[in-house]
Amino acid sequence: MSFLSRFFGFAGSDKNRLAIEALHEQVVLAARQEGFYTQYGIEDVFDSRFETFLLMVTLVLRRLYRLPAPAAEVAQDLVDTMIRHFDITLRQEGIGDVAVPKRIKKYAQAFAGRFSAYNSALDAADNTLMRASLMRNLGESVAADRLMRFILATESRFEECDLAVFTDGKVPFPDPVEVE
């Protein structure tokens, strides 16, 4: 049973799934903000959009893991939803049933690696390590310093957020265009 089912008492309903789906959608929309691809030097291709999504979900998870229970369960529900969406996307792209689990494993490993690298660099406030991670994952052309300012602005906004902000689907990501 999901955390939302237990927390809000709507076991057996779709409300918990819908709340996590809304959170996932907010992360997807944050990663799709046009400013990343027009002003941050991030290529507007599948791999770069995927990497941008992984960065945005990492920022949300970092905040969720710092909130009191049951926020860690929301974080796990978000990761589970992300993986489920990987599966759906691959199947919609016509990837065969045999190849889907292998691809999902590859994506999950990529996420785990990015999460670990970004989380470690941010926890250590190591700008050099963070810059290197961003450039390795998003490409040499990324405006890493500006993206780091976006990340810090996001984390600053998230510090003001309690769990309800993440479960009502209104995550306050900054507009990348407004971050100089």
Image (tube, rainbow, N blue to C red):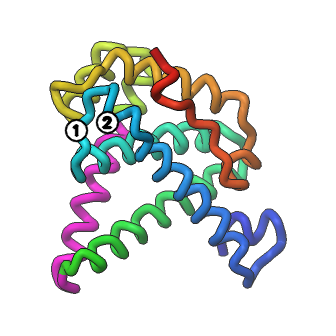
> Residue beneath label 1, please?
43
Q: Which image quadrant: the C terminus?
A: top left
> The magenta stretch spans which residues?
96-117
Q: Are marks 1 and 2 in contact (CB under 8 Å)?
A: yes
Residue at position x 21%, y 80% in the image: 94
Quarter of the image holding residue 66?
Answer: top right
- Image position of 56 (left or right of 130): right
- Residue most toward the right? 9
Residue 116: give x, y in percent of width and height. 36, 38
Tag 2 or tag 1, which sits nearer the N-term?
2
- Image position of 101 (left or right of 25): left
Residue at position x 80%, y 75% in the image: 10
Please name whichever residue, 180 or 95, is drawn nearer the observer in this view of the structure. 180
- Image position of 144 (left or right of 83): left
Q: Which image quadrant: the N terminus?
A: bottom right
Residue at position x 43%, y 15% in the image: 125
Residue 19: give x, y in percent of width and height. 67, 63
Residue 54's disc is: none
Residue 48: give x, y in percent of width and height. 25, 44
Q: Amino acid at mark 1?
A: Glu
Please name whichever residue, 86 or 125, is drawn nearer the observer in this view of the structure. 86
SS at mark 2 in the image? helix
Residue 37's disc is: 2
Quarter of the image holding residue 120?
Answer: top left
Residue at position x 40%, y 33% in the image: 35
Q: Is residue 113 magenta?
A: yes
Q: Crowdedness of circle 1 by 10 Å Cα count: few (<14), some, many (20+)?
A: some
Instruction: Give the dominant element type of the magenta stretch: helix, strand or loop.
Output: helix
Quarter of the image holding residue 8?
Answer: bottom right
Residue 173: give x, y in percent of width and height. 57, 36
